[in-house]
Amino acid sequence: MMKKTGIVFLLLCAIFAIAFSTFALSNSEKLEELRAGRKKLLAEIYKLRVKLIQEDPDIKALHKKIMALHRELAVKIDNKEEMKELLRKNKMIDAEINKLAEGKDNKQ
């Protein structure tokens, strides 16, 4: 009796494993389809936003105001001493990266 129970248990485990792997595969495929669909939809949304900004006078005017405010905000933020220091450090790191990358490119 114990032997039959063990065999039945093993068979059930095998069936479960096969069913689970099939579900996981189809779930994975569905996930990839959804991700691809989302990527395509986001591209369409972006294109429509650009088109609306270019073609609708009210939206275009609002966008122009927002961009001007964004530039003004960036200038004010970048003129703060703490930000100036971080930007200087970033510039130094970029220069070092470029220098090392040039050296590496020349060796190849």
Image (spheres, grey):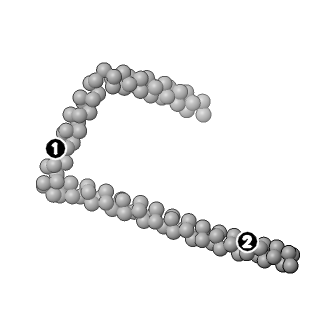
Q: Residue at x 82, y 73 (%)?
A: 6
Q: Secondary structure at mark 1?
A: helix
Is residue 7 in view from this perspective? no
Q: Where, quadrant-wise, is the C terminus in this rendering? A: top right
Return the mark for residue 88.
none
Where 22 sits versus 75, above or below? below
Measuring from the top left, give residue 28's x and y in whole percent.
56, 65
Q: Nearer the viewer, mark 2 or mark 1?
A: 2
Q: Are marks 2 and 1 in contact (CB under 8 Å)?
A: no
Q: Residue at x 37, y 26 (%)?
A: 87
Question: Within 10 Å of the Cα at label 2, are there few (<14), some (14-19), or many (20+) other Cα atoms?
Answer: few
Q: Secondary structure at mark 2?
A: helix
The amino acid beneath tag 1 is Lys
Instruction: Say left or right for 14 vs 19.
Output: right
Q: Where, quadrant-wise, is the N terminus in this rendering? A: bottom right
Q: Nearer the viewer, residue 63 or 15?
A: 15
Instruction: Say left or right for 37 vs 64.
Output: right
Instruction: Say left or right for 59 vs 99.
Output: left
Q: How far apart in space, not on screen, are marks 2 and 1 (Cα)?
A: 64 Å
Q: Residue at x 30, y 20 (%)?
A: 81
Please give the residue where the numbered disc 2 appears in the rendered image.
13
Please give the residue where the numbered disc 1 appears in the rendered image.
65
Measuring from the top left, give residue 70's x and y in whole percent.
23, 39
Where 25 sits versus 52, above or below? below
